[in-house]
Image (cartoon, helix red, strand yellow):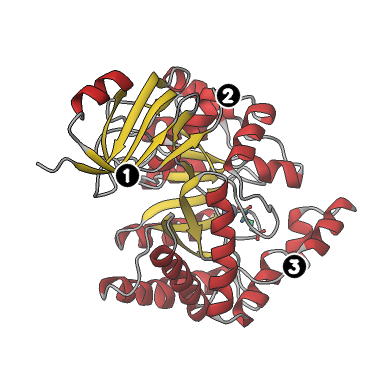
Amino acid sequence: MTNRYRLLVENAKQVVLVCSNGEKYLKSDGMQHLKIIENGSIIVGSNGQIEAVGAADTIKADYSGASFDKVIDATGMCVLPGLVDAHTHPVWAGDRVHEFAMKLAGATYMDVHRAGGGIHFTVEHTRAAVASELVISLSSRLKRMMQTGTTLVECKSGYGLDLQTELKMLEVIQRARHTLPINISSTYCGAHAVPKGKTVAEATEDILQVQLPKLKECMDKGDLQVDNIDVFCEKGVFDLTSTKSILQAGKDMGLNINFHGDELHPMNSAQLGAELGALAISHLEEVTDEGIAAMAKANTAAVLLPTTAYILRLPQPRARDMLKAGVIVALGSDFNPNAYCCSMPIVMHLACVNMRMSMPEALAAATINAAYALGCSSSHGSLEVNKDGDLLILNSTR
Ligand SMILES: N=CN[C@@H](CCC(=O)O)C(=O)O
Ligand SMILES: [Zn+2]
């Protein structure tokens, strides 16, 4: 047995494990009482996984003969799991600050979209951008996310809407996965909007007959790793029927269903997601009581995005109703050219102030539950033995 380890963080005032019994997610009251060790230490092994976590005295005694590549004295500090951002659109070119001005002057998100802006504007610029340019901007955005504590992030395609650009975006995400010290869950979002010049039926056909088969070929050959499938299920974008066929086709390829639903209109997206066994649905500002009940029963996570409601002045997602009903509530930044926030601490803050979540609820939603939404809660989202040694050390007593 080896007695050399990569890292010892010792004597922290608090080690916030979040949970400690292999929970895949936390619900309702379980999110109020997170597992905390006062005066604790944690060891990360040479494989990058957590070797031990516990009271500082116990760790010291158990590992008295061990050596460490690095030792950090965390006296007076607080150790947390790395934050998980469960929803981002970080690959794009073209600035949309002019649309912010339009919105401040009264235009809605869909007014801008229908006028050919919004996602369409970004599609035009992203199609024209070369991959190397997208890699550079993506890397700088991911680095900013890391600086605010994100260690696992979901990254979507969806500003291509054609085979060539969707693949280019997924390849850019793959490059970042291999070059940056951040974990990535990759999402194919070819149904993010109906491309200009196509009907919903034509766009759906292209995704089912052209884009998904090619994606599968690339995945089977090992050229691309993609984890999730996404659709923007919304009035004026993809209706319930087309959404269902695209999500089902993705699921049949082995992708996790994780899609945009019930954002601007009640579409019964939540019920559809529950029926299809979706791992997660994002937004849900307009979800109905029936949708909430269906998600709670199916263990479909709700990825709530407080920056969207803030920037678009939408009704807040009904976090309290969802928590009460037993929905697995997670958080994401929704980083995109319209909602320009890389910081999960700000997202958690907005969740507390605007969605009335408690601080422990927000932390659970940004760690174990966000990891669950990405199918990663066996390796991320809490400080437990054999999970990835992704941790934050806050130079703060609490
Ligand atoms: N609602 C759809 N998609 C994004 C916005 C993307 C964009 O406007 O570029 C979202 O999650 O908020
Ligand atoms: Zn989104």
Tally of marks: 3
Res 388 label: 1
Residue named by callout 3: 117
**Mark 1 neighbour density, 10 Å: few (under 14) some (14–19) many (20 or more):** many
Note whether ligand 2 is within 8 Å of mark 1. no
Q: Nearer the viewer, mark 3 or mark 1?
A: 1
Residue 351 appears at what percent x and percent y? 62, 32
Q: Amino acid at mark 2?
A: Arg
User: CB of mark 3 within 8 Å of CB of mark 1?
Assistant: no
Q: Amino acid at mark 3?
A: Gly
Looking at the image, tell me whether mark 1 or mark 2 is earlier in sequence order. Answer: 2
State which image quarter holds ligand 2: bottom right
Q: Secondary structure at mark 1?
A: loop
Q: CA distance from mark 2 to mark 3?
A: 34 Å
Between the residue at mark 1 and the residue at mark 2, the CA separation in whole angstroms equals 31 Å
The residue where tag 2 is placed is: 320
Q: Is mark 2 within 8 Å of ligand 1?
A: no
338 vs 344: above or below: below
Q: 34 or 326, which is in the foreground?
A: 34
